Image (cartoon, coloured by chain):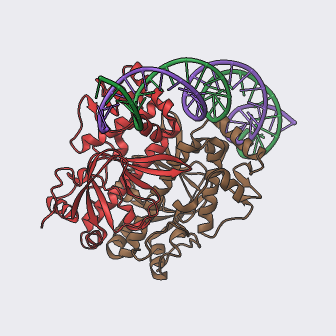
Chain colours: A red, B brown, C green, D purple
Amino acid sequence: MEFPNTGDFLAGRLRDKLGHDDLEYIESLVVERREAETGQVLLSRGAIADTSTILISGYMFRTIESGNQRFIVGLHVPGDFVDLHGFALKRLDHNVVAAGPVVYGVAPHEKLREALEERPRVARALWFATLLDAAIHRKWIQMLEQLDAPRRIAHIYCELHRRFELIGQANARSLRTPFTQIDLADMCGVSAIHANRAVGKLRELGLGEIRRGDLYTSDWDALRKYAQFEPDYLYGDGPLRFDQDWL
Amino acid sequence: MEFPNTGDFLAGRLRDKLGHDDLEYIESLVVERREAETGQVLLSRGAIADTSTILISGYMFRTIESGNQRFIVGLHVPGDFVDLHGFALKRLDHNVVAAGPVVYGVAPHEKLREALEERPRVARALWFATLLDAAIHRKWIQMLEQLDAPRRIAHIYCELHRRFELIGQANARSLRTPFTQIDLADMCGVSAIHANRAVGKLRELGLGEIRRGDLYTSDWDALRKYAQFEPDYLYGDGPLRFDQDWL
DNA sequence: CACCGAAGCTAACATGCATCAGTAGACGGT
DNA sequence: ACCGTCTACTGATGCATGTTAGCTTCGGTG
């Protein structure tokens, strides 16, 4: 079967959890490969979609608009399905926006429906992906309840770094993103000015230098400790695992 | 088939979305009815469960512990499955705690597994329930990013009121809960002292009176407006719906 | 090179919230 | 009736964050 060259990222998190045939099957769901620029709204709240989107390269935001303000409620990295729930929820409660230049794949709901019916293991893998999103949401809630602005920013970078590790894309001394300080502010629920102060504090503490979204650090462990980052909730290796038998 | 008398609450949110036979089937998954007292931990982070829990009456918290602090990252009302994800994730990333006296039903994973395989509509309904949880999580993230403490408390009560409406249990002038001000503080990410001041502010503004967790108000609309509460994300009636055909 | 807009940055002041200290009332146990 | 504990409540003070205003740096473009 033909499918676009989507590289290694497709089904990133699921890669080592599924067999080769299931992975290939998932790749075959993607019928088209597209690109988008910074700020482009790929999915609008309330719109009906008949396709789902898988991120191939770059970052995407989940955003909720309220008043004239934008709130970022989630982040996605390559390999993530960004709107599996749109399949069941029909109309989404939020937007999905390109955080920078992105490449993404498109999977028709029709094919997904087929997959759910005929491939129970694939169906479970997709369900697992949505559960993982929910676990990340819960961590963000706790992060917002517990941490001050500098720690929130540090936590977000630590999370991203771990998520890249899990798809084999982490860098030892840096993490490159297209985020502006305004983006960071909208993730942390603080003003852009305060996000700037928070970035300055991380620099001042010697924990990391954030320049145009890119984080440079010589000591991820120190940053993780400062942010009280505990990666369990990402369900990689470690005490929290998902049920391999079930999957 | 015998099943415990679980009353009208079982599968509360799904009640009018599924056929009678599917509902009865879901009820048959519950093999035992139990009770618990305030503060009892029903599910601990990291523990392995071979059953899932459905809340029949009362409230439950999802909590994450960090340091010696407790953070409440989610709420549940009667009819909610509180740990469907425990089925796939094996070990949970958080605790589930009785917020007051509760009655709950127990469904063995074995029976759930059977349901997923043999009843696609039931499987989708359960998936939908977890997606709804995620949508509520996203709203909480936005709420924490956008609102100050008094509005957060107002928003939480508005959400609960709407969720009770959706299972036919709302009261026009009040909402009874067992929440202490400490509980409210742990949901809002503020100190107990500040939660007290926030409660005082709602009273002062004439929007509502909170006494021992019970909210009394003469004007839900004013409270909703103050909290900027938009119920779409709960996927009841209105612009956001889930896909009836799919379900 | 000159210009422009977007992003990053700084200062000064106002508000939200944390913290510490303490009081008062409700409740259960003895 | 007494005691201890938990919850609700209050005031004073300091830190975290918002707001307003203005400035600088950088990358792209004419």
Looking at the image, is A196 positioned above or below residue B79? above
- Res B3 seen here: yes
- Res A148 seen here: no
Q: Residue at x 62, y 45 (%)?
A: B184
Residue B147 falls in image quadrant: top right
- Total numbered circles: 0
The picture places residue C26, in percent across and down from the top left corner, at 78, 45
Residue B163 falls in image quadrant: bottom right
The picture places residue B122, in percent across and down from the top left corner, at 40, 73
B149, B34: nearer the viewer: B149
Residue B84 falls in image quadrant: bottom left
Say left or right for B157 vs A185: right
A94, A158: nearer the viewer: A94
Q: Residue at x 66, y 55 (%)?
A: B224
Q: Residue furthest left?
A: A1
Looking at the image, is B194 positioned above or below residue A126? above
The picture places residue A156, in percent across and down from the top left corner, at 39, 37
Q: Residue at x 27, y 61 (%)?
A: A106
Q: Residue at x 64, y 56 (%)?
A: B158
Q: Quadrant of the C terminus of chain B?
A: bottom left
The picture places residue A228, in percent across and down from the top left corner, at 42, 32
